[in-house]
């Protein structure tokens, strides 16, 4: 279905209408491929999860970093940040369905839990764009200046607030989605990155990539209440779907820490990894954690019963986002 673009107002209240964006017919598939974004090569790598062999590559736009499944599960959105577009894939096969241009610098992206809002973080433009979503179309509600280098995000469970880290100012910002206004900002330390909300919206966990810990923020009192030491370059999170634990990659230390988010303590470290662990994905049986090694051009597979790296797969340069359709369900309301 064609995409229509309307004129951009100076205020940005209604900037673009992307019609029929999610009207995608189901596609038959034989197997669910693992999809890895090679951000420095403008491509994605497809991996067979059974044989653990690379079975193909597909071109993308420039610098694909992050990805997100659509609410209906029919498409996987890849955000091409430098090409200023979104690429829609079959989430099972990784084959391209269509592209949407004119989305400026979509470094990070996310849907609110109620699926009424779609948000992109424009890292190099120092801006967050908020779109209204009605199940079929996206309409840009507001472009919000938010210096400097907004990167990762997570939402409140009631879909009223999106929290965004600002890497170069060391802050986390809370944005009211209904009014598209910044409610507050809090300085949390050097180079905050990944965000994750604990169940009940009690605490925000923030990976401090410029330090060696996870900052624990009470979003109600707007205070850092604790720091959990993990490893140098604490970066991104993946819920382990057991109602208790979450993994955090330590990108400089080249380790992964396991945190108990009910007690806000570290319970284990996974060592012996390749350089630059970044994004993670959990197998449907919850036994294996797949991780991209940003500085090593590989993906690794960790056995969570032994906390050992059991296999590595060569992919492209700077592998970042990773996804497979038979992923485990998420325990908490706000996934990483």
Image (tube, rainbow, N blue to C red):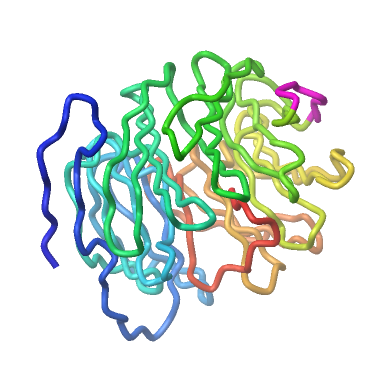
Q: Is residue 306 left or right of residue 286?
A: right
Name the residue nearer the viewer: 320 or 77.
Answer: 77
From this view, report whether residue 293 is shown above or below residue 91. Answer: above
Instruction: Name the residue located 56 percent from the left edge and 29 percent from the top edge.
Output: 174
From this view, report whether residue 165 is shown above or below residue 204. Answer: above
Instruction: Name the residue located 48 percent from the left edge and 60 percent from the top edge.
Output: 323
Instruction: Name the residue located 59 percent from the left edge and 58 percent from the top edge.
Output: 290
Q: Where does the image place residue 193, in percent across and percent down from the top left?
A: 56, 30
Query: Does the magenta run of residues contain 53?
Result: no
Q: Where does the image place residue 53, in percent across and percent down from the top left?
A: 45, 68
Q: Is residue 115 left or right of residue 309?
A: left
Q: Is residue 245 left or right of residue 163?
A: right
Q: Is residue 191 left or right of residue 54?
A: right
Quadrant occupied by the N terminus: bottom left
Q: Where does the image place residue 102, in percent across and percent down from the top left?
A: 18, 42
From this view, report whether residue 220 is shown above or below residue 305. Answer: above
Count of all numbered marks drawn on residues in the image: 0
Q: Main secondary structure of the magenta part?
A: strand
Name the residue nearer the viewer: 248 or 335.
Answer: 335
Name the residue nearer the viewer: 47 or 331.
Answer: 331
Q: Which residues fall within the magenta stretch?
A: 221-229
């Amino acid at each position: 279905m064609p995409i229509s673009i309307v004129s951009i107002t100076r205020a940005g209240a209604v900037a673009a209408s992307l019609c029929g964006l999610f009207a995608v017919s189901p596609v038959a598939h034989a197997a669910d491929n693992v999809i890895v974004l090679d951000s420095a090569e403008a491509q994605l790598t497809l991996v067979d999860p059974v044989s653990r062999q690379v079975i193909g590559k597909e071109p993308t736009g420039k610098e694909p970093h992050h990805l997100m499944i659509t609410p209906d599960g029919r498409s996987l959105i890849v955000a091409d940040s430098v090409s200023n577009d979104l690429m829609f894939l079959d989430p099972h096969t990784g084959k391209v369905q269509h592209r949407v241009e004119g989305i400026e610098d979509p470094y990070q992206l996310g849907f609110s839990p109620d699926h009424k809002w779609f948000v992109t973080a424009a890292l190099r433009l120092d801006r967050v764009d908020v779109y209204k979503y009605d199940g079929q179309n996206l309409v840009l509600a507001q472009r919000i200046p938010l210096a400097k280098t907004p990167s990762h995000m997570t939402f409140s469970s009631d879909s009223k607030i999106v929290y965004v880290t600002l890497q170069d100012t060391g802050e986390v910002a809370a944005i009211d989605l209904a009014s598209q206004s910044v409610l507050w900002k809090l300085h949390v330390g050097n180079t905050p990155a990944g965000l994750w909300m604990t169940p009940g919206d009690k605490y925000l966990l923030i990976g401090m990539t410029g330090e060696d810990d996870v900052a624990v923020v009470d979003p109600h009192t707007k205070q850092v209440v604790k720091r959990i030491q993990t490893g140098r370059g604490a970066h991104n999170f993946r819920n382990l779907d057991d109602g208790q634990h979450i993994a955090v990659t330590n990108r400089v230390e080249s380790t992964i820490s396991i945190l108990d988010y009910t007690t806000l303590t570290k319970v284990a470290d996974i060592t012996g990894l390749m350089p630059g662990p970044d994004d993670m994905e959990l197998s449907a049986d919850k036994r294996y954690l797949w991780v991209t090694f940003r500085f090593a051009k590989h993906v690794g597979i960790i056995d969570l019963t032994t906390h050992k790296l059991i296999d590595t797969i060569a992919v492209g340069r700077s592998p970042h986002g990773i996804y497979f359709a038979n992923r485990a369900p998420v325990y908490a309301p706000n996934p990483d």
